[in-house]
Amino acid sequence: MARVTCLQEIVPGDQTKRGRRLWCARWNRRGDKLALCGEDGKLEIWELLKPVVSDVSVGGEPLLRQVQLLEGVHNRTVRSVAWSGRHLAAASFDGTVSVWTEAKGRLEETATLEGHENEVKSVSFNASGSLLTTCSRDKSVWVWELTPAELGDDEDEFECAAVLTPHSQDVKRVAFHPSRDLIVSGSYDDTLKVHKEELDDWCTTGAVGSHGSTVWAVDWFPCDEQDLVVSSCQDTTLKIWRLTHTDGDWRLEMSSALTGYHTAAVYDVSCNAEGLLATASADDSICVFKVKTDVFPVEVALLTKIEAAHDADVNSVHWHPTQPLLASCSDDGTVKVWKVEMDGM
């Protein structure tokens, strides 16, 4: 079991009332910043004030404070954000991706990536930050390559390295493997697929996973034992897959199908190095599971379910990279930071 405490509730924007729908909350890789985005096209950057949270008490000093508002770039919803070491990428329904570069603790827009024909739904950086993947309602998955600024140049440059059309419908989510240059995508066509670089080009492998309805979210477990992917679906099902590569054949083998934990669509999933899996649902709840990642099939146990975690659909969950903290955001216009403690720890 696990003990869960809400350490802080944030109402971004107008602090006196709940306003815009919030789509995504993501910690940066250092764990000292949290990026938020929503339906108004703005990005907010919040700073973690306490590097160690073991002694944080409910009702004490705030855990986060807003340090930057990024606006004036997107005129429609920003659906997803992703961090690399020094960049923040934002996917917008205006069909573009903005890239922001950090310098002296501040983010400045340094690139706008164009090419998708419709709304951009998701963004993800690879482990080194040298590659960015994006996906869209136009059914495509793009891979962008970063060319770092040389001495005297003002900005890094992103160039399109590949355009893949692996799905027959809207692509909802993309995610880079935590240490390898592999991409998993999930789609309205009820499938998830894996893509890799081959001979200086990108291709879609034969690894395909299927759900009974729209695949809303995908994520990789950052574990060394095996390549594990989690996917979530409109029909409330969660699936855990193992990616294998034998004699040139790539496959997604289903390890576990988790049903009955949510009563509405599961919009987001987040995995951490401790084997914890968090899920966000349209039933307003959050579930936290413990997954034993060194066996196949994996062993899964529900640690806790936070009923009424928000007052409306929970759209996003994301684990802090080093602390037992989980960020969530919702249609109710709030962001919450939860402390998750395993019993016996």
Image: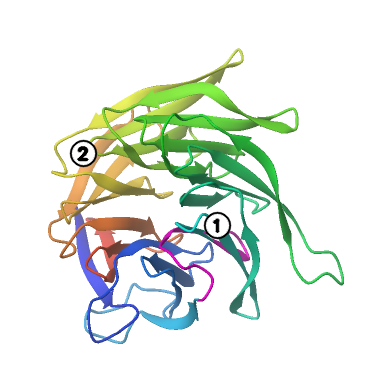
Asked if the stretch drawn in magenta spans residue 74, the answer is yes
Q: Which residues are magenta?
A: 72-89
Return the residue found at the far top. 247
Amino acid type, callout 1: Thr
Asked if residue 66 is positioned above or below residue 160 in the image, the reply reads: below
Q: Which residue is mark 2?
A: 236
Asked if residue 55 is positioned above or below residue 261 in the image, the reply reads: below
Q: Residue at x 13, y 60 (%)?
A: 308
Q: Residue 315 vs residue 193: left or right? A: left
Amino acid type, callout 2: Thr
Asked if residue 100 is positioned above or below residue 193 in the image, the reply reads: below
Q: Secondary structure at mark 1?
A: loop
Residue 222 makes an appearance in the image: no
Q: Residue at x 54, y 38 (%)?
A: 183
Q: Secondary structure at mark 2?
A: loop
Q: Nearer the viewer, residue 13 or 127?
A: 13
- For residue 96, the mark is 1
Q: Residue at x 29, y 56 (%)?
A: 315
Classify 10 Å Cα crowding around label 1: few (below 14), some (14-19), many (20 and above).
Answer: many
